[in-house]
Amino acid sequence: MDGQTVVVTGASRGIGAAVARSFADEGATVVACAREQDELDALPESIETVRADVRDEFDVERLMETAARAGGDGIDVVVACAGVYHGAPGETPLTEEPYASFDDTLRTNVRGVFAAIQEALPHLADDARVLVPSGSVARETKPGYGSYAVSKAATEAVVRGFATELDQSVGVVDPGQVATDLTGGQGRDPEDVAGLFLWAATNAPTDELDGEVVGLKAWKQATA
């Protein structure tokens, strides 16, 4: 990925941090953001970090402008990993969801993805790819996942909408359950799924990615 510029939101921990490190290891110019700068300081010095809150479109605009300058030739890949889950996974039914939690979940997980794509548009390379993590909870209703499940379903709709309107590829990446704060530490190590995002950004067939969902099975079959 030498010569390519990658933006990763929500990069202070979990999938975002693993993906940022993986792209940097492959030679990409990586610009990563999170809400708190001190949480970004654990990333390698080769990764440029920007304190940015995806709920604030002006923060996201500044992030994308910084990334475009860092690479010099625009942005090649955006990985919109920033997300929140208020409560314990599987224990947050909609019937008990506080309005404040519902609002912040959608503002971060849905509007934040919208902002990441919207503010990247002026800087995207012609063959750029935008990747948005999601999971089966967006498509298979399960009790107890409240606004988080709603937000993931809405996020996938945002992806499909942009995919129909942009020349660049916009797709969902489903890594299965990954051990992060959002899953209560249950699932695969984030480092073990970073390769899925690399493949989706570089070698996944466009017709299988654009407006679609690519997951572990497709990645493993393609790289076996």
Image (spheres, grey):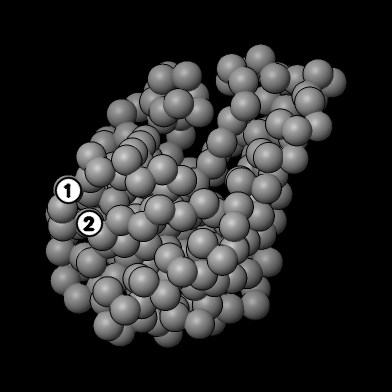
Where residue 140 appears, as percent x and y from the top left, is 68, 33
Amino acid type, label 2: Ile
Where residue 107 appears, as percent x and y from the top left, is 67, 48
Q: Which residue is mark 1?
A: 44
Between 182 and 218, the residue placed more toward the observer is 182
Residue 23: quadrant of the picture: bottom left
Q: CA gap, disc 1 to disc 2?
A: 6 Å
Between 34 and 139, the residue placed more toward the observer is 34
Q: For mark 2, does the 10 Å Cα neighbourhood hold few (<14), some (14 to 19), or many (20 or more) residues?
A: some
Q: Horizontally, is 122 left or right of 145 in the view?
A: left
Q: Residue at x 41, y 43 (%)?
A: 36
Question: The N terminus is located in which quarter?
Answer: bottom left
Question: Where 214 sits versus 142, above or below?
Answer: below
Amino acid type, label 1: Pro
User: Which numbered tag is attached to residue 47?
Assistant: 2
Where residue 153 appears, as percent x and y from the top left, is 68, 45
Contact between marks 1 and 2 (CB within 8 A): the answer is yes
Where residue 114 appears, as percent x and y from the top left, is 62, 61
Q: Horizontally, is 29 left or right of 124 in the view?
A: left
Q: Residue at x 42, y 84 (%)?
A: 126
Q: Is residue 206 visible?
A: no
Q: Residue at x 66, y 39 (%)?
A: 105
Q: Horizontally, is 97 left or right of 122 in the view?
A: right
| Element at label 2 | loop
Q: Is residue 145 visible?
A: yes
Q: Residue at x 29, y 70 (%)?
A: 5
Question: Where 100 sits versus 6, above or below?
Answer: above
Q: For mark 1, does the 10 Å Cα neighbourhood hold few (<14), some (14 to 19), or many (20 or more) residues?
A: few
| Element at label 1 | loop
